[in-house]
Image (tube, rainbow, N blue to C red):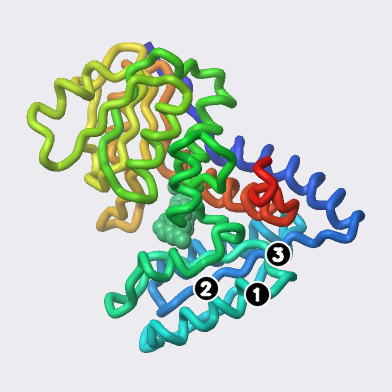
Amino acid sequence: MSANTINGKELAHKLREEMAEEVSRLRSEGIVPHLTVIIVGDDPASKSYVNGKKKASAQTGISSEVIEMPSSLSQDRLLEKIEELNNDEAVHGILVQLPLPEHIDEQLVIESISPYKDVDGFHPFNIGKMMTGDAAFLPCTPYGILTMLHSYDIPISGKHAVVLGRSNIVGKPVGQLLLNENATVTYCHSRTDNLYDYTRSADILIAAVGKPNMISADDIKEGSVIIDVGINRQEDGSLTGDVDFASAAEKASHITPVPKGVGPMTITMLLQNTIKAAKGLSRRGG
Ligand SMILES: Nc1nc2c(c(=O)[nH]1)N[C@@H](CN(C=O)c1ccc(C(=O)N[C@@H](CCC(=O)O)C(=O)O)cc1)CN2
């Protein structure tokens, strides 16, 4: 078997075109969706992701501002800035690019953002709503993965979904979203015994570990759906995922590549959350 490639870049492009139409309608009603991104320090990867967010916002008609702050910034100053943005009615979405320098408490920063402007979907209020299946801002990477599965008509209900990784921004929430859609979910992590027994029984395998090529054809079930969230930079500068694409593609039914798989969907769902914030949907439970 040769798998269908789930093309995140192409899907992201299509969704962004649809969003641009929606933003144009909102603008004609006098609503200009606005996203403010804060970046602390000068990590090159973070800078490149933030640039991507700015560019994608502009292409969609979403107004955006990037606030660059030095890595020497105090935590109090960052919290003050966030409070200012929380109180600014023209700002619909606030995002603080992660990771933050070590002297800043990441969780405290996340919790200082108004849950109604939390377009990253990281605030405990939104995480709680997601767990109960209520309207919430969903974390962008997991939301992007669900959108990919839906767009490719991949059945979720009743399927065994195995999530490799338990980070707060990808592993835990993607498992919860799959559970909300009636998958039977198993979480695996660095302490899991006999990990490959689980991966081989997965109908849907989400690899979000950050270990290059840790999954190959021998580790997956025939006809399974493989979602690779890993972004691992090689010595030659190229990117590779957690899955050995060439071998897994021989056995899977669907597979995401790296790059151009899950990555572009992360920024796309951020745009979607910003539009939702501008429409005030999360406040009204829509
Ligand atoms: N506040 C946040 N911080 C971080 C998040 C997040 O969702 N919110 N996620 C990641 C980084 N990230 C967005 O911020 C992100 C990562 C990867 C991509 C992407 O499109 N990747 C491309 C490859 C890009 C390359 O060549 O380097 C791909 O996979 O095709 C977009 C966004 C951590 N921080």
Q: Which mark's residue is nearer the viewer, 1 or 2?
A: 1
Question: Local crowd at mark 2 within 10 Å, few (<14), some, or many (≥20)?
Answer: many
Question: Local crowd at mark 1 within 10 Å, few (<14), some, or many (≥20)?
Answer: few
Quarter placement of the C terminus: top right
Name the one closer to the observer, 239 or 165: 165
Apparent side of residue 11 relative to residue 176 in the rendered image (left or right): right
Q: Position of residue 251 (x, y in %)?
A: 32, 16
Kind of element beneath mark 2: strand
Kind of element beneath mark 1: loop
Point 40% across, 87% down: residue: 73
Mark 3 and mark 2: span between their CA atoms?
13 Å
Residue type, numbered disc 3: His
Q: Position of residue 185 (x, y in %)?
A: 32, 25
Residue type, numbered disc 2: Ile
Q: Earlier in the sequence, mark 1 or mark 3?
A: 3
Mark 1 and mark 2: span between their CA atoms?
16 Å
Name the one closer to the observer, 223 or 109: 109
Q: Label 3: which residue? A: 34
